[in-house]
Amino acid sequence: MGVSGTIEYLSDLVSSAAGGYRLKKKKKKPEQTVDVKIKMDCDGCERKVKNALKSLSGVKKVEINRKISKASVTGYVDQAKVLKAAKSTGKKVEIWPYVPYTLVKQPYDPKAYDKKAPAGHVRNVEFSANVENIVPVYDPYTNLFSDENPNACSIM
């Protein structure tokens, strides 16, 4: 521990012992990207949404894709605040519910498939098939003519 670290430790120790309160450091939010689905019909709608999202503090970049109705906000922002700012435009807003279909185990599952999803995307759902509920099917006819069956020759 260096000299400055020692002095800081001793000052914290003395201030807490003397009954003084310790200033809490604010944690900085991690930089993240928040994607929202928001319906935009024209350039005016797009501009209105972009300005509303840019007005948030901590926003570094706002990307709008009107074709797939997606807005991406990058920066030190909170997801709830982004949703609130987007809803202030009067549009229907939700968190981006789609992922590329290659990331989903069962992309053609009725829960995952969505007609309104952009090309190459499906809804983000967890595939929850219980292994206990799956019953193995025993087919005696495939085993009857199998090469591993020693009685197969006598049957043929």
Image: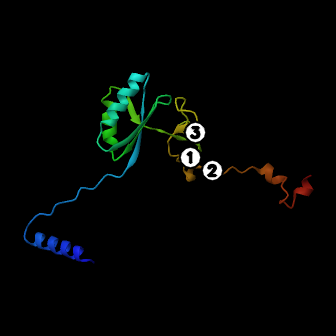
Q: Quadrant of the N terminus?
A: bottom left
Q: Residue 76, image x and y in percent? A: 34, 47
Q: Earlier in the sequence, mark 1 or mark 2?
A: 1
Q: Tell me, for residue 103, which label it has, or none.
A: 1
* Location of mark 2 (residue): 135
Q: For residue 113, what is the image quadrant?
A: top right
Q: Tell me, for residue 109, which label it has, or none.
A: 3
Q: Tell me, for residue 67, which label it has, or none.
A: none
Q: Earlier in the sequence, mark 3 or mark 1?
A: 1
Q: Earlier in the sequence, mark 3 or mark 2?
A: 3
Is disc 1 placed on a helix, strand or loop? helix
Residues at discs 1 and 2 in contact (Cβ within 8 Å): no
Please indicate whether residue 94 sits to the left or right of residue 148 in the image. left
Q: Residue 112, image x and y in percent? A: 53, 38
State the separation of the CA atoms marked 3 and 1: 13 Å
Taking the view exactly as shown, the residue that stands out farthest to the front is: 3
| Amino acid type, residue under disc 1 in the picture | Leu
In the image, residue 52 above or below residue 77: above
State the separation of the CA atoms marked 1 and 2: 27 Å
| Amino acid type, residue under disc 2 in the picture | Val
Give the residue drawn at x 85%, y 52%.
145
Q: Name the residue nearer the viewer: 47 or 152.
A: 47
Q: Give the label, 3 or 1, closer to the camera.
A: 1
The 10 Å Cα crowd at callout 2, few under 14, some 14 to 19, many 20 or more, is few
Q: Residue 50, image x and y in percent? A: 37, 32
Q: For residue 11, what is the image quadrant?
A: bottom left
